[in-house]
Amino acid sequence: MQHLWHAFADMHTLDASGPLVIARGEGIHVWDAGGRRYLDATASLWYCNVGFGRDELADAAAEQLRTLAAYSTFGDLTNAPAENLADRVSALSPVPDSRVFLTSGGSDSIDTAAKMARRYWQLRGEPERTILVGRSRAYHGMHLGGTSLAGIEANAEGHGTFVGEIARVAWDDPDALRATIEEHGAGRIAAFFCEPVIGAGGVFAAPDGYLSEVRRICRDHDVLFVADEVITGFGRAGEWFASSRWDLDPDLITCAKGITSGYLPMGAVIAAPRVYEPFAAPGAGMWRHGYTYSGHATVAAVALANIAILEREELPARALQLEKQLEESLAPLADHERVEEVRSGTGVLAAVQPTSAALADPSYAPRLVAACREAGVITRTLATGALQVSPALVIDQEGLEELTAGIAAALERVAPAD
Ligand SMILES: Cc1ncc(COP(=O)(O)O)c(C=O)c1O
């Protein structure tokens, strides 16, 4: 009897079929407990930007663990890796003079940003600005705040009442945002949350002009613009931050995943001076928010070592080069009769979308994922039933061919039931 309750799992099925135990990893590959090698098309959960098996990250962790594993950053306490990491992230971010609030992951970052936005308006003397606006298809983590804000209905269903004062707009229509702001009145809207490229919702790049238009709308109505860069941050979209690529000038950036490449768990919220100032104004008092592991010393040391690799190997720029190669490699899959489209072309992020006819058979997508594994490629399905493609940023042409060949073989092998 196994006692691990898996995340995002149908435990009835899993208890019968058993899990796939991943035992080790190197570069773009992982090995299962039986010694079988797979190309990891997903970089685990979008996070392993520098690839698996980096000794220097293990060394950074070991050295810090021996010196001081962790120490609180509540109040006036701190530790050197946390301080250095915040300086580094602020300097790399597209937000000059930003402050960095460290968390334990992406969901923490989202809920921190949501509370930060509401608190900001309180401190600014506009306490009515409490409504948070999210987009359809959006994924903002699994805390109560992020699940409420996100646009994937299935993730919210069946848990009773979620967080209030949330509005949802169509993911691809700036007019929908404008209309929502006008409907509620700008004086009620605290912040707009926006993934520069929608990830778990199915990998959807924003339509041309969308991002600049929603940015302008937020500025015109003095609504805080929050870029959720949990996936796109730290190189995956072809720059350190997607906000730079699309000139988003965000008030807040949420990040996680690539900040450590997942070697240890961490997230961060990068706050523009405008947001930070009222929190640090005379009389503002203590902001009663933080996590036990905010600024965990060992995680911060690993994050610094991970950032050093991203920088030394110029992996954000490499992701930009890979963007075209990935697009070209996957393009032939779109000709398959059971593929509706291949979405790619923004960094090392893509999705292979089966047709709705194929997905009408509920067993099709799980069987397709299983066939990919049989063909030596690990992937999974996203909210639309598409296969996720987001390998480590160290993948090369040979790896891309291996990845595409595995998916192509699976598409050939699996047919939906009539
Ligand atoms: C855009 C986005 N925001 C937030 C999160 C939540 O991050 P975590 O799973 O680390 O809590 C994710 C996770 O995939 C994400 O993709």
Image (cartoon, rainbow, N blue to C red):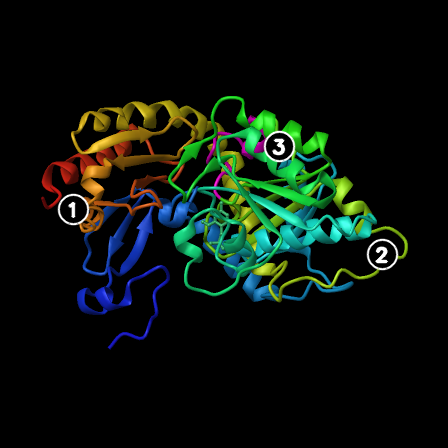
C-beta proximity under 8 Å, tags 1 and 3: no
Looking at the rendered structure, the secondary structure element under dot 3 is helix
Which-is-in-front pick, marks 1 and 2? 2
Q: Is ligand 1 within 8 Å of the beta carbon of the residue shown at mark 3?
A: no
Give whichever of 8, 320 is nearer the camera.
8
| Magenta region includes residue 287 | no
Q: Which residue is mark 2?
A: 284
Marks 1 and 2, how far apart at CA: 57 Å
Give percent across and percent down for residue 393: 40, 36
For the N terminus, which image quadrant? Answer: bottom left
With 189 as the anchor, is 393 left or right in this view? Answer: left
Which-is-in-front pick, marks 1 and 3? 3
Question: Is residue 250 visible to us here?
Answer: yes
Would you identify the image quadrant in which residue 200 lies? top left
Marks 1 and 3, how far apart at CA: 44 Å
Looking at the rendered structure, the secondary structure element under dot 1 is helix
Earlier residue among tags 1 and 3? 3
Which numbered disc covers residue 371? 1
Give percent across and percent down for residue 415: 11, 41
Q: Amino acid at mark 3?
A: Arg
Question: Is residue 53 visible to us here?
Answer: no
Give percent across and percent down for residue 396: 32, 31
* Picture layout, residue 293 above or below residue 270: below
Q: Is ligand 1 within 8 Å of the beta carbon of the residue shown at mark 1?
A: no
Give whichever of 413, 405 is nearer the camera.
413
The residues colored magenta run: 231-246
The image shows a total of numbered marks equal to 3
Q: Which residue is mark 3?
A: 178
* Picture layout, residue 302 above or below residue 270: below
Marks 3 and 2, how far apart at CA: 32 Å
Earlier residue among tags 3 and 2? 3
| Magenta region includes residue 236 | yes
